[in-house]
Amino acid sequence: MMHLEINGQSHEVDVDEETPLLWVIRDNLGMTGTKYGCGIAQCGACSVLIEGVVTRSCVTPVSSVVGKPVTTIEKIEEDPLGKRVVEAWVRHQVPQCGYCQSGQVMAATALLKQTPHAGEAEIEAAMTNLCRCGTYNAIRVALHDIAGTGAQA
């Protein structure tokens, strides 16, 4: 039995310690906002925040997060910055299909927590999640809007 702190709530799970955090979040805890994309930590659809750091949950063993706060997309709007990110996503009509957007929002929130006035170089370096719909320009505009660094299309 492992004790997890996810979205400010305590959870006891009885899974193999190497089970990817993604599957515990989705299958054991029923939080399906975090998505499975590639399973090899390349696409970012599974991104969550662990101690505030954006992390690919598809390759993160659940045992490595015991005792660490984990935030998923289900609770991101309870964070004032996370709420601003979601509002900017809506304002700039970022999502198309939306599949990758929970991971994109998590990555954007982590970036802006670390670098509140992120410029183009920081945005490009941090926003490595993949999007099949190609919403990268809209994501960049939304991030510049929040960071106050000018929306550059």
Image (cartoon, grey):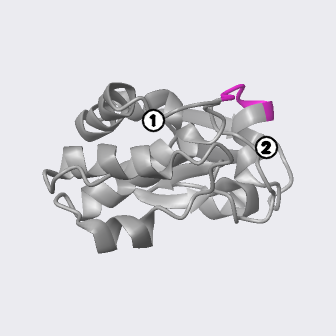
Tag 2: residue type?
Trp
Residue 23 bears which disc, if any?
2
Q: Can the viewer see residue 1 in this picture?
A: no
- Left/right placement of residue 118 relative to residue 11 reads left
Q: Which residue is mark 1?
A: 94
Q: Position of residue 110 (x, y in %)?
A: 37, 55
Is 123 colored magenta in this rendering? Answer: no
Task: Please state which of residues 58 and 93 is positioned toward the viewer in this rendering.
Answer: 93
Q: Sequence order check: which comes first, mark 2 or mark 1?
A: 2
Question: At label 1, which amino acid type do we have?
Answer: Val
| Image x and y of residue 23, in percent | 79, 43
Q: Residues within 10 Å of mark 2 (few under 14, many from 20)?
A: many
State the image coordinates of residue 62 (x, y, percent, origin top left): 71, 55
In the depicted structure, whether residue 94 falls above or below residue 153: above
Label 2 and label 1: CA atoms lie apart by: 27 Å
In this view, which residue lies farthest toward the right?
16
Q: Which residues are magenta?
A: 27-32
